Image (cartoon, grey):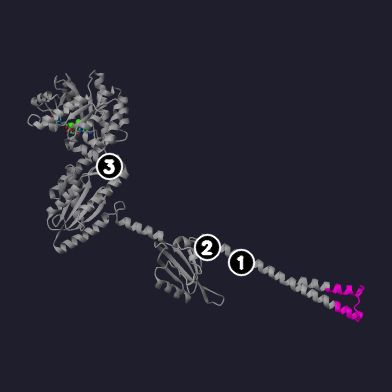
Amino acid sequence: MLLLTAAAGGLVLSHVSFIEHSPLPSLDGLDRPSLLRLWSLAFAFALAIFIVIFALSALFRREVLRRRRSDSAIGRFRQAADASSDLITIMTTSGRIEYVNDAVERSTGYLKDTLVNIWPSPRMPWYNDAGLFRQMRDTVRSGGEFMKDIDGRTREGGPLLIGERVVPFRNDKGVVTRMVSTARDLTRERHLEDRIDYLGRYDPLTGLPNRRTLIGQLEQSVRAAMAAGSSLSVLILDIDRFKHVNDLCGSDAGDDVLKQIAGLIQSSVSPADIVARTGNDEFCVIHVDERNPVLAGAVAQQLRTALSQTISAGGHDIIVTISTGIAVHPGHGDDAWTLLKNADLALASAKAQGRNMIQFFDQEITNRVKEFFILERRLFAALRNSEYLLHYQPYCDLQTRKVAGAEALVRWQNAELGVVSPARFIPSLEETGMVIEVGRWILETACNQISKWERMNRHFPVSVNLSMVQFRHQHLVAMVRDTINNFGFDPRRLTLEVTETVFMQDMDFAIKTLKRLKDVGVTLSVDDFGTGYSSLSYIKKLPVDNLKIDISFVRDVSRDQDSASIITAITTLARSLGLKTIAEGVETEEQRNILHLLRCDMGQGFYFSKAVSAGEFEKLLL
Ligand code: C2E
Ligand code: CA
Ligand code: CA
């Protein structure tokens, strides 16, 4: 500006001197000096106007520039605010909203247009509590800072938890003119915390209380029962062989089964009873207001009936049985822990006795269960310590009485326990999954023996039993093929025995697996035939070679007409299908004679020989 004035001044001076020396246009009646003054005056005036206009336009340009800069600063601020994950709200002191950022829209579900500059103002409509809003407003208006976790509500009515901090905004004179709220959306965090808390107390799959919660509830129930002088029972229910369901049908189907079972348990106990899931395949029922322990047995029976049904899951029909252990207060314990422990012991005893059992706790159980656990522990080391051996029991032609084949039967010889029957330890092997490893050893040992006998020119088939778990194992067919190839013999020499119960679980799967085994070239026998299905006709669908008539029919054949009729039905069916029959458990000459009359092909049993070592078996052949 200074430069400009100087320039203007210079211009005026040069102009005056220019006028002084140049010829001037004359105005009538004015002498030259007056004319000169007039011109100079007009010129100075014009110049002043020019300077004023110039200065104003410069000022105006500067203001536009400043505005533009400030607008872009606000734009940047808005951008930054919208990018923030925190909820930012600017309000007047009366609570009318002037500005909200995008996060407010995202978290509360309210659109900006429905919030900003609305009169009467929506006053942060996600505030659930009008009193709380007033408290916030009063605090901030009076210059204070307001901090609180607000339990709000989204536009859809959903939960909203925000950690809010509202501060006053003052003008130049220090007067509070605005309230600025910055808030963090804590809804997800709280949801997570709630979830963690829930998971700590409930089973997410079934929604039932978990073990921890149950113990708390049981403690309460025991206290109440003691105060009232009444009794209560703790029932622990365990699904028999549930591991197989998971192994065979997949864990999704397993989960589905558990959910269905949880539902069945809940619907078959009284509403006052407490149901919890205390383990993977274990449920617990607290039956309260119980004056008679026998009634606990009735509850268990009722549950067993309710659960004894085919459950469909993941395309499989699964037959479920449960074992139940019961402890009753008073008598079996006066606190939650003792009652649970004793019900657990009763359960273990029920399992050790077989499946589908109900067992009350008693002192003797402790000893029996201990024994069972000792057995199971020793079983783990048995394979490594070479405690298993294979014996061979012959089956003979009923007409010629000559050895027609052998069944390999596993024996377990333990230094402390002596010889343990497979009927006692095979279920444990199945339960623990060890049967896969032990089963492989049995197959290899039997195949090794077959190839030895083949080299000795002794040609007869040897059967190996397959348990349910082995039959369902995904590598079974490959393992059988590889083992036969390793030892190199005619695959027809190996017979695999599978029980009927294997088909009961899933007929389609059984047929597929049997066909694949047939493709390997082995011979197939149905073990314990006649015990599983009421109808025998399903056998037509199976690609098998032999039927082994169950020992229960053979035992009674000489006394019981029904057994004889069943055997006749089986042998007739077998002949029509081109299958051979082998009667199990033939102990007497009489049985042999009748079975021969009933057109049974072969017999196996103590009448011919018990199971013996391979060396002794060779002597039998002579
Ligand atoms: P199983 O397959 O039905 O085997 C026949 C069982 O009947 C054998 O009992 C055998 O010793 C017995 N037995 C044979 N003749 C007679 C008789 O005249 N009278 C009586 N009362 N019993 C007779 P064992 O060896 O105790 O085997 C019991 C079960 O254990 C077998 O029943 C089979 O299911 C299972 N098992 C045995 N060895 C193996 C094996 O190597 N692998 C698998 N997975 N299971 C096996
Ligand atoms: Ca068998
Ligand atoms: Ca059998």
Q: Which mark is residue 245?
A: 3
Residue found at x 55% / y 61%: 79
Give the numbered dot on residue 70.
1
Most foreground residue, 149 or 362: 149
**Magenta region includes residue 152:** no
Task: Inspect the image, locate mark 1, and give the three-letter code of the amino acid beneath it.
Answer: Ser
Does label 1 or label 2 sit earlier along the sequence? 1
* Residue farthest to the front, as pictured: 28
Q: Earlier in the sequence, mark 3 or mark 1?
A: 1
x and y percentages locating residue 428 in the rendered image: 22, 40
Callouts 3 and 1 close, C-beta under 8 Å: no
Q: Residue at x 30, y 32 (%)?
A: 512
Q: Position of residue 589 (x, y in %)?
A: 8, 24
Q: Secondary structure at mark 2?
A: helix
Q: Report, in whole angstroms, how far the alpha carbon at label 2 lies from the one at label 3.
A: 55 Å
Residue type, label 2: Ala
Asked which secondary structure carries label 3, the reply is helix
Disc ID at residue 81: 2
34 to 608, vertically: above or below: below
